[in-house]
Amino acid sequence: MSSVLCAHFDTPEGRWTLVSEFTTEDAANQFVPHIGQRLGGDDLSVGASVEPRPPTPPSSVSAKFNASSTLMVSGGLMFGDSAPVASGVKAHGLANRPTHVMMFQAEPESQSEPEALAKSKPHGKGLVTKSTSSFVARIITNENLARWIVDSRTTYILFNAPKCFNVVGMQPDNRGETLARLDMSLASPTCYDVNSGARLDVVMGFVRGNIVWYEPVSGKYARLNKNSGYVPSVMCVRWLPSSSTLFMVGMADGAVMVMDRTKDEFVVPPMPHSHVFACAETRPKTNPVSYWRVSNKPITSIEFSPDARHVAVTSEDGSLRIIDYMEESLCDVYESYFGGLTCCAWSKDQKYVVTGGKDDLITVWSYYDKTVVARGQGHKSWVRNVAFDSMHCGATYRFFSVGDDARLLVWDLSLSALHRPRVHTSRVAASPTNTGTHSRVPGQSREPTVHARMPKGSVAVLQPLVAEAIHDAPLCSLSLSQDLLVTACRKGVIKVWKRPTPYLS
């Protein structure tokens, strides 16, 4: 790969420009004891372009870091299967994990609550509070955290290294400031999600099955399955739409749970083994609120539909499942071309679901027509993350993808962009069935529809609009907003890209 990476890439609307670049090490060096100090490195503002850094040879990385952590940017953007890890910390199962993305800005729900937050003070003036817990070692809070939260210009950068979770704020006129940090005694977060609004509610999962709720403003936290004995790794987590208490968790044993952050007791319900998808009976006063057996392989991603009724679930078994989570009913099952699926995303209008996987393909599924629309060919290795661009939803849909080939691919989906296959198989060969290993769940209103795998020659081919090597290490995450794109690689290098001028005007 070239020693000089591109600082821009072009789409029909104009040029996307690299405006900021920093690393996990840049940020980590600022945290303790200088709470509230601005981050070093490149300016995080989006007013001017910057030149990309040359690739960093492994020997030049600080001696206090070595292999594998996960990084989350802007409220859920988890970077790096092999970003820096503190010396002496063993990363249990962190390598080769898919990552999950979400970018957000502060959006206060009302005027009264933000004003109260702005006047409130957390623990003290940059106070470092030691914890009596055997799980959490200390809590660090910036005195200005509440004021950052109520400022609508704030974009959040959250990330973890082994044994810690960090919150950083970024504004156009501020390079970035450390707002909060949660240090764990032994465990390392593997995934997390943020419920943004007038305050920040963070829920995070760990390799050994722990699930923790954390609220940075107050510094409060809670272990929601303490001493439960349930130890499969937490693979992914998402807050339920419009809920301040409920969230969904995907586990390494193929289970999916709905949890309530206000409930302390955790009891694993008995699960019948006769169904691949089955719902267990849960206790009304304990977690989990719901418990499903979805697969026999690890769950890799969960994404809620825009109508806030369905959830798309991908798994290492190569299946995309559409579940009506309110009715606890499995609706449809779609199979990958081959290999496990690693990520998924919904279009803004809910017409399409896009998946990426270990077959190096992007697959576009029609939610309403219940069929494969196209397979995107362009990645040269496993696809790690996909995201729709909400600025393109109509005659043409645009989405972005990143993968282990260290490339960013941009795709335009429209009828004119599809290359029709020369050979068409019969409708019978590709028709859905109601047979297979996905058995009917007692109480479920209908049988799930298992859609047959479509042969390669019967599916339209989609080619990428843009394919650029923008990092010098495998890419693992991306996140889109109305004005920015954020990408990250396994070395822990984070890059911020500004949209072309036509969007911003």
Image (spheres, helix red, strand yellow):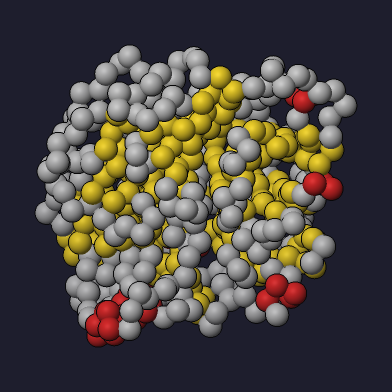
| Residue 434 higher or lower than 376, as above or below | above
Residue 37 visible somewhere in the drawing: yes
In this view of the protein, which residue sits in the foreground, 119 or 351? 351
Where residue 86 sits in the image (x, y, percent)? 39, 47
Q: Say which residue appears at 80% left-offset and 68% top-offset.
A: 14
Q: Quadrant of the N terminus?
A: top right
Q: Say which residue appears at 42% left-offset and 72% top-offset.
A: 106
| Residue 19 higher or lower than 294, as above or below | below
Residue 190 visible somewhere in the drawing: no
| Residue 92 higher or lower than 485, as above or below | above
Q: Say which residue appears at 61% left-offset and 48% top-offset.
A: 351
Q: Is residue 250 left or right of residue 466?
A: left
Q: Is residue 219 left or right of residue 436?
A: left
Direction right: furthest residue: 422
Residue 38 occupies quadrant: bottom left
Q: Say which residue appears at 28% left-offset and 65% top-offset.
A: 216
Where residue 275 sits in the image (x, y, percent)? 36, 18
Where residue 218 sits in the image (x, y, percent)? 22, 68
Where residue 255 sits in the image (x, y, percent)? 35, 30
